[in-house]
Image (spheres, rainbow, N blue to C red):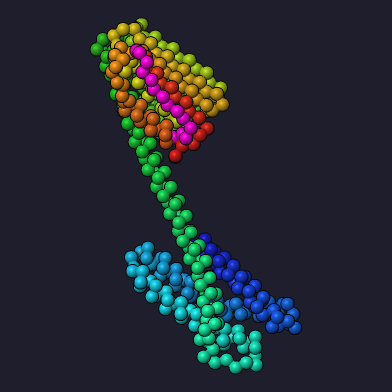
Amino acid sequence: MKSKLYRHLLFWLACSVQGTLLEYTWIEYVFAKQSAGHIILLAISFNLALMPSKILFTYYALHVAVTQPLKKPYKISVIVIKLSIAFILAIILHRIGSVYFVDPMENPRAHYTFRNVFDFSWMFVSLLDIGCVAGIAAALKLFRMQAINIRNEKDLVKEKLETELKFLKNQINPHFLFNTLNNIYALARKKSDKTPEVVVRLSKLLRFMLYESAKDTIPIVDEIRILDDYVQLERIRHSDRLKVCFDKDIDDYNKRIAPLILLPFIENAFKHGVNETIYESSIKVKVELKEGQLNFFVKNSHDREDNKPVNENIGLSNVRRQLELMYDDFSLTTRDVGQTFIVDLKINLNSNGKI
């Protein structure tokens, strides 16, 4: 409320200064024998005498032409009629201030009557004076309303994107949990001695997902630790028939990254590669970070026929959308070459996304 009052006071102060300067320029030659200080005081008093007509019409025009139509639709013809009547009354009030205050002080010997109020040429001058102030006020009002609308639209878009991102994360986490529980179920059926170790590692993953994944970003060292835990879970399950190569070349382990943005790619490599073949399988993972540029490479073997299409599952589709929301500068390519599926992801971690 205070900021609104200050804006209005600042606007009318600027109008008063501008009006005073115009009056000073206009009467300077009339009161040439007077001191500059006296002329300035006269200019200020003349301007103040004409201000009420400008103020009244300006606020009425803003209410009728801008504020009121936003609350309730009005016909344009009704608005035009109201403004026209108000404009005429404002011009008359402006002329009354001139005829009964300004003009007698400029020319005391002249005789002014109410008929002088309706002098056409001077009424046109009043029209320009009032119209200029009201026009500037309306333009500023519309500009501010437009700026507020743009800001509100940006806030709504950001809120929508944040909601979408949360939804995507909530989809990925249960999807990951479902796959890991399947792994535990398979070990339990075999009555494997490794089942307790898998449960412990899963509890670490769930703790991370509960406390860390809700954050916007985490240090990349934490993301890599989760990748290691997941790889170890899969190694325990598949034993000797799985060969995993996990290379890391990181120049800054504290560089921040969106949580769980890399895990779905490794998860996908196991689910659609190792888990769908009865032969020996291999997975190669490479994480490289240099000066904020992340290069993430995953290659897994599979037994699918070359002509069988590979569609993105829910994990890859969601993480692709997350990347679009989180980072402006990234590239994600997937290739199915022979019996090898390759994921090549590049992210500029210094870039900002839509949210």
Is residue 159 found left or right of 124 in the rendered image? Answer: left
- Magenta segment includes 17: no
Quarter residue 228 falls in: top left
Image coords of residue 162 (percent x, y): 39, 40
Asked whether the viewer can see residue 292, the reply is yes
Quarter residue 213 falls in: top left
Residue at figure coordinates x 65%, y 88% from the top left? 107
The one nearer the camera, 31 or 203, is: 31
Image coords of residue 156 (percent x, y): 39, 47
Residue at figure coordinates x 32%, y 18% from the top left? 271
Q: Residue furthest toward the left? A: 189
From what the image shows, is residue 246 above or below residue 161? above
Is residue 238 found left or right of 121 in the rendered image? Answer: left
From what the image shows, is residue 147 above or below residue 77? above
Asked whether the viewer can see residue 237, the reply is no
What number of labels is visible? 0
From what the image shows, is residue 322 above or below residue 232? below
The one nearer the camera, 235 or 38, is: 38
Write the start and end of the magenta stretch as one range.
326-339
